[in-house]
Amino acid sequence: MEVNASCCRVPVRDGHLESVAVELTDNPDIEVVINTLASFRGNPGVTGLPTAPEFPLIVRTEKDRPQPVLDLQAGSPERAKGMAVTIGRLRKKGTKVNFFLLVHNTIRGAAGTCILNAEMALRRGLIR
């Protein structure tokens, strides 16, 4: 799989909107791609941690999503708001899939990931 990604700052206080192009080795139907992304659950060692989102990837099918104002605080449960990555505007041509993703740069980025890593280290007994 070859990935070509670009990140641009959007005129909002928080959030990174990325344009991603992925070239697959096979040619699955776009619905297979969407279902694969939507069913992703991440590392089992992270599942159930306090700041881990239940669904790390949220796939939106609307033509105009993701949008920072509407999707930046994505995720559940409530304590994991902002930790999920919202994916949308999926389109496919041949073996190439293009989409946009939105991630909260401080909640999922620097601060949130540090907290999630600490929760995982605590669970594994690496810290007390």
Image (cartoon, helix red, strand yellow):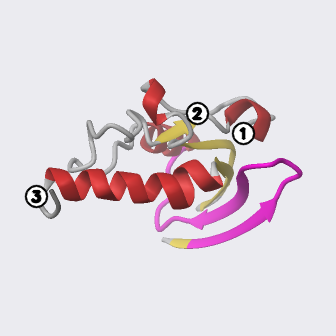
* Between marks 1 and 2 in the image, the one whose residue lies nearer the viewer: 2
Q: Which residues are magenta?
A: 3-29
Quarter holding the C terminus?
bottom left
* Between marks 3 and 1 in the image, the one whose residue lies nearer the viewer: 3
Q: Give how far across and how far down residue 100 sits, in percent.
A: 70, 51
Q: Looking at the image, is 26 positioned above or below residue 66?
A: below
Residue 66, labelled with which disc? Answer: 1
The residue pinned by badge 3 equals 125
Alpha-carbon span between mark 2 and mark 3: 30 Å
Callout 2 secondary element: loop
Callout 3 secondary element: loop
In the rendered structure, are the residues bearing label 1 and label 2 in contact, judged by CB atoms less than 8 Å apart? yes
The residue pinned by badge 2 equals 74
Taking 85 as reference, is 68 left or right?
right
Residue occupying image coordinates x 41% and y 37%: 53
Q: Tell whether position 92 is magenta.
A: no
